[in-house]
Image: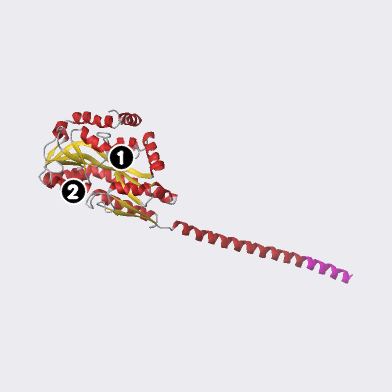
Amino acid sequence: MISSILDISNEFFQLQNKGITQYRRRLKLKRKWTLFLIVFLIAAIAFVPAQTTKKYVLKFNHVLTTQDPYHAAFLKWAEAVSARTNGNLKIEVFPSAQLGVEEDILEQIRQGANVGQNTDAARLGQYVPAIAVMNGPYFVDTLDEVQKLNTLPSVQAWKAELEKTQGFKILSFMWVQGFRQMFTNKPVRKPSDLKGLRIRTPPAPIWQESIRAIGATPVAMAYGDMYSGLQTKAIDGVELSFTAGAAGKFQEVTKYVCETKHILLINFEVISSKWFNSLPVEYQKILEEECNKAGLEVSKQYLEVIDPQSLAKLKAAGMTFIPASEIDMAAFKAAGEKAYQKLNLLAVRDQVYKELGKTK
């Protein structure tokens, strides 16, 4: 009887030990899998920074001087991008065309180089002709209208075409550099006053035809050659914003600043679409967002504060100011129509106006 009880007890303890052993084996296996998962997660986490800490550099070129408000705005854009990317995306800003003339930089962009350029619709129109309309005479009148342009089907189509077929990525065109005015050595109040005057323009068809349409003879010349061009009488005048005129000290070589407001200059910040698409998606978003933000900020300051202050400096320096109230704006606007007709852009402009809800 006692031996039977002992046998039963031994069997019980053997079964119990067997269960404990199996439990320990399962626990050991579970610990191994847990350790494996921990190691895998650590490796995965370690791998992510290796992907995102790659350094990117954009060399950004513009023709303006370091005194121009846009230079400070470009630097602000660069600082914001660097801060949001922890220094992994850096923008190096080169004023006064230090990297080269605008046309050469645009060709480098098309080839995929990590360079950028502050340009305009006139030059981009040499690649996608319809977009040049945005540089036409008396095209838009306010910064609000410029912002609305970016929502229009026509404008979106032009941007897509530039990116897909020409290699240009437009980061922003929310950079409005004020109205272009005439700096001359004779007063200008109507289109006929410009007859025979050689006015410097960039070498783009819409720009040259715009100046020709309102009465002057356009002369293609590099931005940096304008001051000496006036000194040597190679040109009779330039067309610039009040601020660009003051920054370039054109009050020293011209006598009159005439408020013709013939072009509201919309600047485009462009880079290579190939290089842009090589960036992490997050960086792409940051680059565009901060470019728009900096552009709108400086544009508002330019139109509301900086340009009026610059005009005051020009007048204080002895320039004679011919205000818009003394200028036959209706005659200038009517004359400007010839530029759209000459370049077959009249239908394009009218379509944009229809999308914009704007009348002529």
Tag 2 or tag 1, which sits nearer the N-term?
1
Residue occupying image coordinates x 27% and y 43% = 299
| Range drawn in magenta | 1-15
**What is the chief secondary structure element of the magenta stretch?**
helix
Above or below, 109 against 45 in this view is: above
Q: Which residue is mark 2?
A: 248
- In the rendered structure, the answer to whether residue 118 lies left or right of residue 38 reads left
Q: Residue furthest right?
A: 1
Q: Residues within 10 Å of mark 1 (few under 14, many from 20)?
A: many
Q: CA distance from mark 1 to mark 2?
A: 23 Å
Residue bearing the label numbered 1: 121
Query: Does residue 317 appear left or right of residue 5 in this picture?
Result: left
* In front of the other: 158 or 358: 158
Question: As drawn, is 290 to the left or to the right of 4?
Answer: left
**Residue 257 included in the magenta stretch of the image:** no
Asked which quadrant contains residue 127, the reply is top left
Give how far across and how far down residue 153 sits, in percent: 39, 34
Residue 126 placement (x, y as % from top left):
32, 39
Does residue 272 sit above or below 10 in this rendering? above
Please, what secondary structure does the residue beneath circle 2 have? loop
Q: Amino acid at mark 1?
A: Ala
Inspect the magenta stretch and tell me whether residue 8 lies in it. yes
Expressed as whole percent of the image width and height from the top left, the position of residue 276 reads 40, 49
Residue 75 drawn above or below residue 144: below
For badge 2, the amino acid type reads: Gly
Image x and y of residue 261, in percent: 21, 36
The crowd level at tag 2 (other Cα within 10 Å; few <14, some 14-19, many 20+) is: some
